[in-house]
Image (cartoon, rainbow, N blue to C red):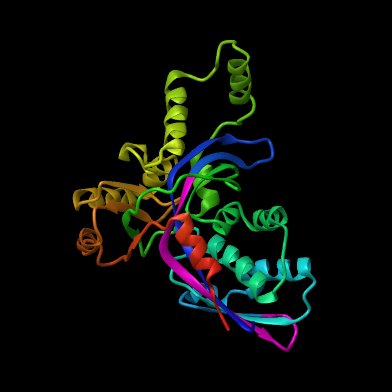
Amino acid sequence: MDEVRIPAFAKINVRLDVLGKRPDGFHELRTIFQTISLHDELVMRRTRGPGIALRVEGNAALSVEPVEKNLVYRAVDLLRHELRVRGGVEISLRKKIPAGRGLGGGSSDAAAALLGYLRLSGKKLEAARWMELAASLGADVPFFLHGGRALGVSKGDEIYPLPDAGKQYLLVVSPCDIHVSTPDAYKWLNTQPLYRKEVRGILRAAAGRKALTNAAEASRIWRFCALCCSVQGTGPLSNFANDFEGPVFLRHPRLKQIKRVLLQNGAAEASLAGSGSAVFGVFPSPATARRAAVRFPHDQTFVCETISRDRYIRAVSGARVR
């Protein structure tokens, strides 16, 4: 085949708990990912010349930065070396997912690049190695190899599929004037070292001795476990939670206001997307979501829906080829 077209879907976090900072400097997470229909598109074509040519459309900042910094370029370059492919490739990345908004656009683009280039090359790769390469590009990238609804642990890169939920309709609001740096968001959390107290408490509890985990924290853990096991997926709407909301809303009060306006205009629940700055609301229908979008005339808004794992796999596996 000479050409592959593949979508790169965005994600939300139904729940995002930051447990603490690990000795390696990363944060230990427990999160539930969910893919949504908002998506970018990659078009890949074989070329006779060597190397990778990347063109970005729909995002002015990304279109002028050095291509070697782009995760799509890095993903294809990584896979070319892994598969020992010498031929060149021309890539067009059409952006619709806003960058730096907690929707996973860059990570999804990287995963789509891995999926698309593997198909374009006609080669195969062991699944475990595929996941390892994905994780080397970013913590969220392994999730986007499979999509749907999944539990992410460790840095969020250790992925376990969860039962798909029923379709949910969403309004995603991307504020035009607010960008939240992920490293800054983690600093604002001011988390404590994880393994000095929490792990010892877990081990003592497992051994039948007194646990160091307080009642509130224990309740939080069990609510998270119940959410993971629920076949209704998003389950009781009170289970939506994101540890970044407190510190991010404190520094950007307008994001808290966006959440409040979503709830006042028909959203059953609303939450920050990842570390922000996008905020999403869950609505009973696309029509109610579109009506609520009118309340944000100066921001980007996207009416979309959740994507099941089966639908996700069909979309990326059925990438159009020529």
Vertical position of residue 45 compared to residue 164: above or below: below
| Image location (x, y in percent) of residue 120 | 65, 76
- Where 32 sits versus 114, above or below? above
The residue shown at (47%, 29%) is 221
Tally the numbered discs.
0
* Residue 26: percent from left, percent from top: 63, 42
Place of residue 264 in the rendered image (x, y in percent of width and height, measured from the top left): 19, 49
Q: Main secondary structure of the magenta part?
A: strand
Residue 103 visible here: no
Q: Is residue 236 left or right of residue 43?
A: left
Quadrant containing the N terminus is: bottom right
Q: Is residue 172 left or right of residue 28?
A: left
Q: Nearer the viewer, residue 256 or 266?
A: 266
Image coordinates of residue 182 in percent, x first then y, are: 52, 52
> Relative to 29, is 83 above or below?
below
Q: Tell me where the magenta segment starts and ends, as one range.
A: 32-52
Q: Residue at x 67, y 69 (%)?
A: 118
The stretch drawn in magenta includes residue 40: yes
Residue under the image location 46 percent in, 50 percent down: 274
> Can the viewer see residue 38?
yes
Which one is in front, 100 or 84?
Answer: 84
Q: Is residue 93 left or right of residue 173?
A: right
The one nearer the camera, 129 or 63, is 129
Q: Is residue 32 left or right of residue 25?
A: left
Please, which residue is most extreme toward the bottom here?
48
Asked whether residue 315 is drawn in magenta, I would say no
In the image, farthest residue toward the top: 209
